Image (spheres, grey):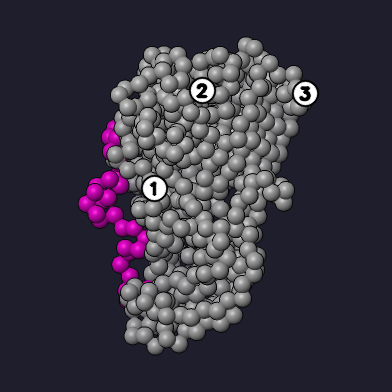
């Protein structure tokens, strides 16, 4: 069977179409008007000069915008009043014959505001922090098991630290982009850069009060999505509203890179207070993890930062808590491994510190605190091979060659060290996906599902899953995805694509085979079966998580503090990897993003005005090729019959988890400087 990526040839030839590239007739171009204040209201909008420009076709403001359903998502319902909830919020749009005319005219609009005092600075020690009702993915806000305070009081080894992760923004190579058009009889068609066509459709159906049958979302190729494209944001609503004004002409709105820092979500900064108590044998007796982070007054989103601490290590006493600062800022949202990514940075640097305090090798320490039961639920893990990942990785990385103590290895002006961290990510299941599988008389098979391939290789993996379930060659199977005309599917989020879409396809394929076995002959139109994602019978009986271990070789320059990472290795236990080429690419991609977060990524919000100042790729640093040395990802054989019929756990996010901690731990081993805050910029080592 071929390992080739089905979407590869189109992407390499440049024939793969991304959202803004779909040929549409006579498009109108949109440029957004955005608030320059963080809180208050628009008192006057003078659009006269803009309207008088050549090529300007119309202006959209809160005065003429279509009314949206009040129960729609608060992040989406723009232009319903003059109120401003954050700087950068859409307050209107200019529509013109060319993008240049739209942008020029937008600059001529005069806006007056009534400004109110805004809370813009994240102050993690503010007593005003509030407890959200739930944290992302529906987890409880706080947990408390055993008697943490008594365990800390009696601890033989006690480590406490405060760990910080910064504000970060999603920057997929393709910015968010939408083309929207309304037909004469009120049908809405969208080309959108999204991780889930049906999630976009359903959100617009709710916002505009439309019949789902009359909204069509198309998204065959997506130039990356790390969570910001998981659910639609206000740019999609703005484009659809604007298209009503000029219907039936389509309206095109690709966001500028700068606008990506305003309206499509971001990762909250976190401040994490962690305590670990251990006995003299290095066994954890208590862990506490208290998180402060931010949310928006417009809509609550609380990242589940302490949630991985509920599952990763054994400890009889454990407390986790999340508190949020509710600010006049845009709504935070998903960014690759929300929760696990920042939370495991704190936990895994703390684990490194505790191992050292116990006089144990970091791998030995983690082995001693492994657990066969999920501490959060008491359930056995469906499979848990963290120790195997650590051991396999240690062998392959040459872990035991490391200097016995920090700052013990120098190469010229570089201090050289190694670090390790554990990774975990849950096997999540989103409800509702359906698939149609059709057998045709010519011996070929069609699979229809509204899934998304955002560059992950989902199309390739689903083709293999279908072929295996049908027991036919892959070349006879054609999978269609990325279109709401196909059966409903959940989006590409939470590393659930293979699990949810694959399970629905396997279910439909099995039912189809049963039907075919009962038939004497194939009708001319073929035989088709549509089936939904079945319940997992093991769901309540075991805890399902992927695990991994990251190893980093780190060099810290003795004079400048510059940090380099010549070598990264990740060994994962993720069940069955459906396609080795695309699977490895996902894991390496996650690790690359983790390294990027370790060394560079940091958005600066100006606390006076509320906007992000480093709003382009020159100033918001992302790891480039020169930052990446040898980077390898591999996996151990893991057979997990409980997660789904494919035995696959999901690989989109676990690669990023743990990478930054491995780098920080390696930087400590190299330099002797313990940095508890990302990114690991040179100043922190001097
Ligand atoms: Mo990912 S943050 O679940 O899109």
Q: Residues within 10 Å of mark 3 (few under 14, many from 20)?
A: few
> From which residue to which does the magenta span run?
1-29
Using a 10 Å C-alpha cutoff, classify the residue at mark 2 as few (fewer than 14 neighbours), some (14 to 19) or many (20 or more).
many
The answer to whether 467 appears left or right of 610 in the picture is left
What is the x, y in percent for residue 484?
46, 58
Q: Please provide percent x and percent y for residue 81.
A: 61, 75
Against 181, residue 524 (above or below) is above
Disc 3 versus disc 2: nearer the observer = 3
Q: Nearer the viewer, residue 448 or 13?
A: 13
Secondary structure character of the magenta stretch overall: loop
Numbered label attached to residue 621: 1
Disc on res. 310: none
Compared across the picture, whether 162 is left or right of 462 comes to: right
Q: Earlier in the sequence, mark 3 or mark 2?
A: 3
Residue 17 vertical position relative to residue 683 in the rendered view, above or below: below
Above or below for 317 versus 678: above
Measured along the vertical axis of the image, is residue 73 above or below residue 556?
A: below
């Amino acid at each position: 069977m071929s390992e080739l990526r089905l979407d590869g040839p189109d992407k390499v030839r440049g024939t793969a179409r991304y959202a803004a590239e779909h040929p549409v007739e006579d498009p109108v171009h949109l440029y957004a008007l955005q608030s320059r204040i963080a809180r208050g209201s628009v008192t006057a909008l003078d659009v006269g000069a803009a309207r008088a420009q050549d090529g300007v076709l119309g202006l959209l403001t809160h005065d003429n915008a279509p009314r949206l359903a009040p129960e729609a998502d608060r992040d989406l319902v723009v232009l319903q009043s003059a109120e401003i909830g954050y700087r950068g919020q859409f307050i209107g749009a200019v529509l013109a014959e060319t993008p240049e005319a739209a942008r020029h005219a937008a600059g001529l609009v005069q806006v007056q505001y009534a400004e109110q005092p805004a809370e813009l600075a994240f102050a993690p020690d503010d007593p005003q922090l509030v407890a959200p009702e739930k944290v992302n993915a529906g987890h409880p806000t706080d947990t408390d098991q055993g008697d943490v305070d008594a365990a800390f009081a009696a601890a033989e080894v006690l480590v406490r630290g405060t760990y910080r992760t910064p504000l970060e923004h999603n920057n997929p190579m393709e910015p968010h982009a939408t083309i929207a058009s309304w037909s004469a009889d009120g049908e809405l068609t969208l080309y959108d850069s999204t991780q889930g066509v049906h999630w976009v459709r359903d959100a617009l159906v709710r916002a505009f009060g439309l019949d789902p049958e009359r909204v069509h979302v198309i998204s065959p190729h997506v130039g990356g999505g790390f969570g910001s494209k998981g659910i639609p944001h206000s740019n999609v609503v703005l484009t659809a509203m604007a298209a009503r004004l000029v219907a039936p002409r389509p309206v095109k709105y690709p966001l500028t890179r700068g606008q990506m820092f305003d309206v499509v979500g971001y990762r909250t900064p976190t401040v994490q207070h962690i305590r670990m108590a251990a006995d003299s044998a290095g066994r954890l007796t208590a862990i506490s993890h208290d998180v402060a982070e931010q949310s928006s007054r417009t809509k609550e989103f609380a990242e589940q930062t302490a949630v991985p601490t509920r599952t990763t290590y054994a400890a009889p006493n454990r407390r986790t808590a999340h508190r949020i600062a509710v600010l006049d800022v845009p709504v935070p949202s998903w960014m690759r491994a929300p929760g696990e990514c920042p939370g495991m940075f704190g936990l895994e640097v703390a684990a490194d510190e505790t191992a050292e305090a116990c006089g144990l090798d970091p791998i030995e320490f983690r082995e001693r605190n492994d657990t066969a039961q999920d501490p959060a639920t008491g359930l056995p893990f469906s499979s848990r091979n963290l120790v195997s990942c650590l051991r396999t990785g240690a062998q392959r990385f040459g872990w035991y060659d490391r200097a016995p103590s920090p700052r013990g290895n120098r190469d010229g002006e570089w201090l050289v060290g190694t670090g390790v961290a554990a990774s975990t990510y849950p096997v999540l299941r989103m409800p509702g996906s359906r698939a149609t599988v059709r057998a045709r008389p010519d011996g070929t098979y069609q699979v229809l599902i509204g899934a998304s391939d955002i560059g992950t290789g989902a199309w390739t993996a689903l083709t293999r899953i279908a072929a295996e379930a049908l027991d036919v060659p892959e070349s006879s199977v054609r999978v269609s995805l990325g279109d709401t005309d196909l059966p409903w599917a959940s989006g590409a989020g939470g590393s659930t694509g293979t699990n949810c879409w694959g399970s629905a396809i396997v279910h439909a394929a099995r039912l189809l085979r049963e039907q075919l076995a009962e038939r004497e002959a194939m009708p001319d139109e073929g035989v088709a079966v549509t089936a939904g994602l079945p319940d997992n019978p093991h769901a309540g009986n075991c805890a399902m998580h992927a695990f991994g271990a990251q190893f980093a070789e780190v060099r810290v320059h003795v004079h400048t503090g510059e940090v380099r990472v010549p070598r990264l290795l990740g060994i994962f236990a993720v069940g069955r990897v459906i396609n080795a080429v695309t699977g490895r690419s996902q894991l390496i991609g996650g690790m690359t993003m983790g390294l990027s977060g370790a060394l560079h990524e940091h958005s600066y919000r100006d606390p006076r005005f509320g906007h992000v100042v480093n709003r382009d790729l020159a100033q918001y640093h992302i790891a480039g090729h020169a930052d990446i040395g040898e980077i390898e990802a591999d996996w151990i054989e893991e057979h997990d019959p409980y997660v789904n019929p494919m035995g696959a756990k999901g690989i989109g996010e676990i690669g990023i988890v743990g990478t930054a901690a491995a780098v920080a731990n390696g930087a400590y081993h190299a330099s002797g400087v313990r940095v508890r805050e990302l990114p690991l910029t040179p100043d922190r080592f001097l």
